[in-house]
């Protein structure tokens, strides 16, 4: 296994540069501790680049990324630019052009004080959601007619393929097998979330899930429609171990899950194609109202860097970064994830120093 990895750094907009800088500070530290190296290449794409050049993200940039091991991403979006223009070109561009079909969202409670649900402890909330990342209503098939009139019609189509559905479901079962039993279960468990009773195209999901599950007799299965699943997330979050769902529903339910464990300031995600270049980011967005103030929490991006380490094969480093953040939340060294509770740069320093202290 190589100990040198080619890393693209895409800071993007708003608080993106601030949170990425702190994640890189943590990455520098674990490289020192575990003896590997990242060769980093900064990419300029985002609002400032677009306003100067009129260019969002060219095909040449995606071609370059295909030769990299991973992308660490900050955030995208700027109020000076039409909503969705940069997001579709850059975020959706990365997902579609690099075929990053897995959106992996850990939902793990590190301390009871972070959970708004009464009586829930860390042992009650430890799940991984696998959101399909390239199809559904996000495939880009849409249109409008009679725009601006009382008879205006706007449409966006949901698209599902057998290939896309099967590969994310299979990924979820493989992940469950890798994780093993959790939360006092005797076997791992995979839960399908869909709405096949009303969105009949999703019958493909129900059928494919059943067929793939037959290949994994040592893994328990469960099913919930999306409305019921949102209720279970609040009422009975320990029901979930590994979840798998569509792009649209995954976008919604994983933000609900983030709020159960401390909010979007702690929520990391991986946009993954196993064995190929993949992209890692916090899910909080660019937050232009606080950009440049050094008050954003970089914890989500630090944990996204931990997911990236796992993807690169540096599993011990990933475990240590996550364990360090968890211990700091449990001990109170990280007092809160609220914007301004710590300086953004201070949090990066705190995590770095704690990693070095634990390594002695």
Image (cartoon, rainbow, N blue to C red):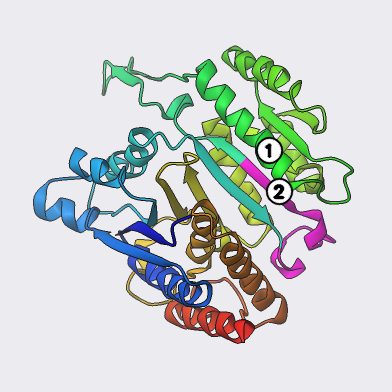
Q: CA distance from mark 1 to mark 2?
A: 7 Å
Q: Classify mark 1: helix, strand or loop.
A: strand
Q: Residue at x 43, y 80 (%)?
A: 345
| Left/right of residue 164 with respect to residue 155 in the rendered view | right
Residue 116 shown in magenta:
yes
Q: Which quadrant holds the C terminus?
A: bottom right
Which mark identifies residue 127? 2
For the residue pair 232 and 312, the one nearer the viewer reads as 312
Location of residue 307 in the rendering, given as x and y in whole percent from the top left corner: 54, 56
- Magenta part of the protein: which range? 110-129
In the picture, the disc for residue 23 is none
Say above or below: 134 vs 317.
above
Quick check: marks 1 and 2 in contact, CB under 8 Å?
A: yes
* Residue for badge 1: 243
Q: Name the element at disc 2.
A: strand
Residue 127 is situated, as x and y percent measured from the top left of the image, at 71, 48
Q: At 71% across and 81% down in the image, what residue appears?
A: 331
Q: Image height check: is 91 above or below 12?
A: above
């Amino acid at each position: 296994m190589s100990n040198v990895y080619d890393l693209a750094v895409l800071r993007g907009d708003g608080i993106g540069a601030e949170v990425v800088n702190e994640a890189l500070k943590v990455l520098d530290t674990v490289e020192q501790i575990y003896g590997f190296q990242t060769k980093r290449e900064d990419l300029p794409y985002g609002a400032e680049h677009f306003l100067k050049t009129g260019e969002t993200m060219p095909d040449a940039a995606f071609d370059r990324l295909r030769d990299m091991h991973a992308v660490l991403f900050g955030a995208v979006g700027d109020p000076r630019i039409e909503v969705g223009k940069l997001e579709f070109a850059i975020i959706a561009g990365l997902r579609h052009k690099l075929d990053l079909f897995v959106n992996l969202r850990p939902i793990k409670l590190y301390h009871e004080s972070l959970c708004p649900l009464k009586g829930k402890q860390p042992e009650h909330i430890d799940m991984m959601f696998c959101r399909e990342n390239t199809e559904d209503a996000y495939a880009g098939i849409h249109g409008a007619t009679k725009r601006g009139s009382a008879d205006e019609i706007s449409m966006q189509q949901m698209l599902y393929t057998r290939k896309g559905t099967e590969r994310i479901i299979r990924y979820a079962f493989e992940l469950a097998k890798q994780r093993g039993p959790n939360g006092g279960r005797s076997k791992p468990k995979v839960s399908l979330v869909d709405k096949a009773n009303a969105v009949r195209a999703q019958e493909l999901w129900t059928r494919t899930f059943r067929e793939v599950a037959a290949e994994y007799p040592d893994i328990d299965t469960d099913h919930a429609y999306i409305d019921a699943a949102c209720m279970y997330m609040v009422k009975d979050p320990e029901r979930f171990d590994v979840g798998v769902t569509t792009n649209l529903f995954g976008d919604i339910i994983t933000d609900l899950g983030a709020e159960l464990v401390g909010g979007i300031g702690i929520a990391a995600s991986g946009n993954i194609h196993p064995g190929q270049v993949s992209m890692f980011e916090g899910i909080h967005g660019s937050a232009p109202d606080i950009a440049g103030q050094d008050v954003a929490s970089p914890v989500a991006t630090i944990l996204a860097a931990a997911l990236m380490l796992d993807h690169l094969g540096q599993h011990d480093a990933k475990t240590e970064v996550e364990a360090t953040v968890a211990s700091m939340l449990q001990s109170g060294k990280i007092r809160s994830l609220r914007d301004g509770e710590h300086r953004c740069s201070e949090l990066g320093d705190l995590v770095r120093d704690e990693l070095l202290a634990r390594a002695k």
